[in-house]
Image (cartoon, helix red, strand yellow):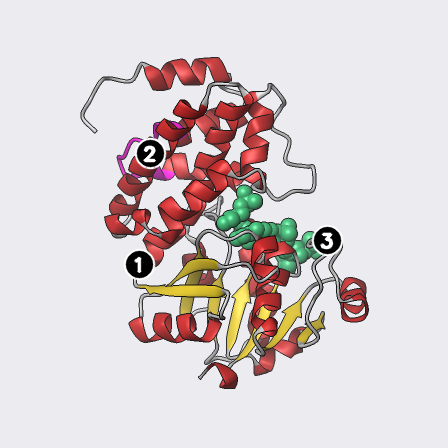
Amino acid sequence: MSEQEKFVVVGAGAFGTALGTVMALDGRSVTLMGRDPSLMADLRNDRVHNAALPGVPLPDLLQFSAEPDALEEATIVLFAVPSQAHADAARHYGPYIHRDAAVVTAAKGIERKSGLLLTQVLERELPHHPLAVLSGPGFAGDLARGLPTAMAIAANDQAIAERLARSLSTPSFRLYASLDPVGVQLGGALKNVLAIACGVVEGAGLGDSARAALISRGLAEMSRLVVAMGGQPDTVRGLSGLGDLVLTATSHQSRNLRFGIGLGQGEPADMSGGNLIEGAYTAAIAASLGESHHVELPVTEAVAAIIEGRLDVRSAMEQLMSRPITTE
Ligand SMILES: NC(=O)C1=CN([C@@H]2O[C@H](COP(=O)(O)OP(=O)(O)OC[C@H]3O[C@@H](n4cnc5c(N)ncnc54)[C@H](OP(=O)(O)O)[C@@H]3O)[C@@H](O)[C@H]2O)C=CC1
Ligand SMILES: O=C(CO)COP(=O)(O)O
């Protein structure tokens, strides 16, 4: 099956380049689609993406294009652009995507303007395509170096989820099919917010015990929102919940964790540094989804308030520690 599929990855940043690389390393026909023609020409010639994946050689089989008509042949299109850019990218590239092609979001966030999950954004912009979400623990650098990684791929349709899991898996990149796109997407989006919280704890020197408490209480609030929004509670114990939370809450490779460490050390919330901090965009919209679905998300709310400058770290900790004593 996979040898008949043609893949285009939209978004020539760290994750898009890594996805293209891991599939091309396994002999797939894959084109990386970027919006800067000179970058795409450099990647074609230099076979390294110094800005996104320094020191990682890009395989000969990986093709590069800035021409959207390269999408016309694709049977599977992966969007690896920031969450807030999904609507723009879908509008721009949509007319070139074959009507039968499956479209997969590989981003981890929620559209801020609408509160929609990214498969819902794609459904709005690209109706009638089979849609899925890829999410789970895996840093771009690890994937592209061929280190072992496992993620979930979720769709409402079992045949699509299984086809994508088979088509995208490689010997180093193992995908598990899921029928819970809501749970898988909320896992990916909320773990970024919780990783910021863990960074705050680390930056403020509050100790590893506090981090472990945050991971486990964070997972509880993730589970509450997943259930309230129609997902499956078990999903949060999987790759795109606990798996990704443990990775990003503990590894300094995580941009969200590092951003949180800065906040914990008293730095202002500044997202202009060139690094994509998805959790900083997700925190407020996730908190308001919690409100509209009548579920408590105290950690997410605290992160949103710290980022917006409404709460300092010490008061946030006092608030979290003084919540009513309850059962686990
Ligand atoms: N990096 C990682 O380890 C992982 C990232 N992810 C997720 O993947 C998503 C992308 O992250 P990542 O690759 O790291 O981010 P990067 O900032 O490295 O790359 C984002 C890419 O998207 C492009 N882009 C931005 N806006 C648009 C647009 N409107 N149309 C077309 N292209 C656009 C950017 O192009 P330009 O440079 O021209 O602005 C850039 O190439 C995020 O949601 C992230 O959470 C998931 C797993 C791992
Ligand atoms: O999602 C990721 C790994 O699974 C990447 O995390 P960061 O965006 O925090 O770097």
Eyeballing the image, is 105 above or below 75? above
Q: Amino acid at mark 2?
A: Ser
User: Where does the image place residue 206, in percent across and percent down from the top left?
Assistant: 47, 18
Q: Is residue 128 visible?
A: no
The span from disc 1 to disc 2 (Cα, nearest Å) is: 21 Å
User: Where does the image place residue 238, in percent across and percent down from the top left?
Assistant: 33, 51
Pick whichever, 116 or 209, lies toward us. Answer: 209
The numbered dot on residue 284 is none
Sequence order check: which comes first, mark 1 or mark 2? 1
Residue depicted at 64% across the width and 73% down the height: 31
Q: Which residue is mark 2?
A: 216
| Contact check, label 1 and label 2, Cβ < 8 Å | no
Q: Which residue is mark 3?
A: 54
Pick whichever, 26 or 290, lies toward us. Answer: 26
Residue depicted at 40% across the width and 47% down the height: 243
The numbered dot on residue 180 is 1
Pick whichever, 74 or 87, lies toward us. Answer: 74
Disc 3 element: loop
Eyeballing the image, is 17 above or below 319? below
Quadrant including the N terminus: bottom left
Disc 2 element: helix
Residue depicted at 45% across the width and 80% down the height: 100
